[in-house]
Amino acid sequence: MNERKRRYLKKRIAIRADGRCEYFRVLEYLSLYEFHLEHIISKKHGGSSLPENLAYACSWCNWKKGPNIATVLYPEGELIRLFNPRAQNWFDHFEADSSGLLIGKSPIGQATIKLLALNDQERIKERLEMIISGCYP
Ligand SMILES: [Zn+2]
C-alpha cells in the first residue's frame, strides 16, 4: 500500500472511531503520540489489513496488545478472547468508575483490561482527567 492510500485509510479509521482509541477511549487530540492502525486479529494469526480487521489505537494499547488475541484469566485459568471493537460494543464490556478505574463488565472486558494494562496508574490518572473534563467515556 502506498503512503497516500495508507494515510487515507488511517483517516477513514480515525473518523469511524470518533478520534478515540477503540480500547482505552482516550481522544487522539489529548494524546502526545500519534495513533496506530491496529490489527485486531494480527497478521501472524491470519488477520487482514482490511478496515473490518483494523482498530484505531493509542500507542499504549497498540504496544500492549501486540499480536495477542486472547489471555488467561485466573484463578479459573480460562482462555478469554480480547475485546473486538468491530464485533462488540465497548459499553457492554467496560465501565469507568468515578475514580478513573476501568471495570470489566464481562470476561472479555476483564481480559482486555488485564492484557492492555488499562488500569496502570498513569492510565487511571489520564482517564480521571478526561472524566473530570467531561470527555469520557
Ligand atoms: Zn489505547
Image (spheres, rainbow, N blue to C red):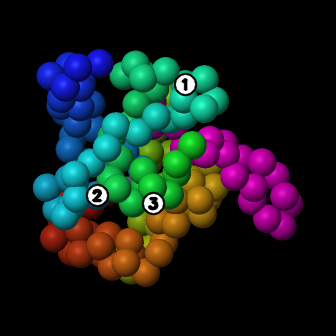
The numbered mark, 2 or 1, whose residue comes first in the sequence reads: 2
Q: Is residue 99 visible?
A: yes
User: Which residue is at a point 23% across and 26% down the rendered structure image?
Assistant: 6
- Residue 29 appears at what percent x and percent y? 14, 55
Give the SS element for disc 1: loop
Which residue was labeled with disc 1? 47
Instruction: Tell me what residue is drawn at x 50 percent, y 35 percent.
Output: 40
Question: How many numbered markers are drawn?
Answer: 3
The Cα atoms of the two marked residues, 3 and 2, are separated by 14 Å
Q: Magenta segment range?
A: 68-86
x, y percent for residue 31 = 21, 61
In the rendered image, residue 96 lying in the magenta stretch gets the answer: no
Is the C-beta of the residue carrying label 3 under 8 Å from the nearest atom of ligand 1? Answer: no
Q: Give the x, y percent position of residue 45.
A: 63, 30
- Residue labelled with disc 2: 26
**Residue picked out by circle 3:** 95
Residue name at image x 84 percent, y 58 percent: 77
Answer above or below: position of 107 versus 131. above
Q: The disc labelled 1 sits on which kind of residue?
A: Gly
Task: State the image coordinates of residue 78 (x, y, percent, origin top left).
Answer: 82, 52
Local secondary structure at mark 3 = strand
Magenta stretch contains residue 82: yes
Residue at the front extreme, as displayed? 2
Query: Which amino acid type corresponds to the residue marked 3 in the rendered image?
Result: Glu
Question: Is residue 132 or residue 48 the one in the foreground?
Answer: 48
**Of the pair 111 and 57, the residue shown nearer to us:** 57
Mark 2 → mark 1, Cα distance in angstroms: 25 Å
Front label number (2 vs 1): 1
Q: Find out if the beta carbon at label 2 lies less than 8 Å from the nearest ligand 1 atom.
A: yes
Q: Would you place residue 52 above or below residue 79 in this image? A: above
Which element is circle 2 on? loop
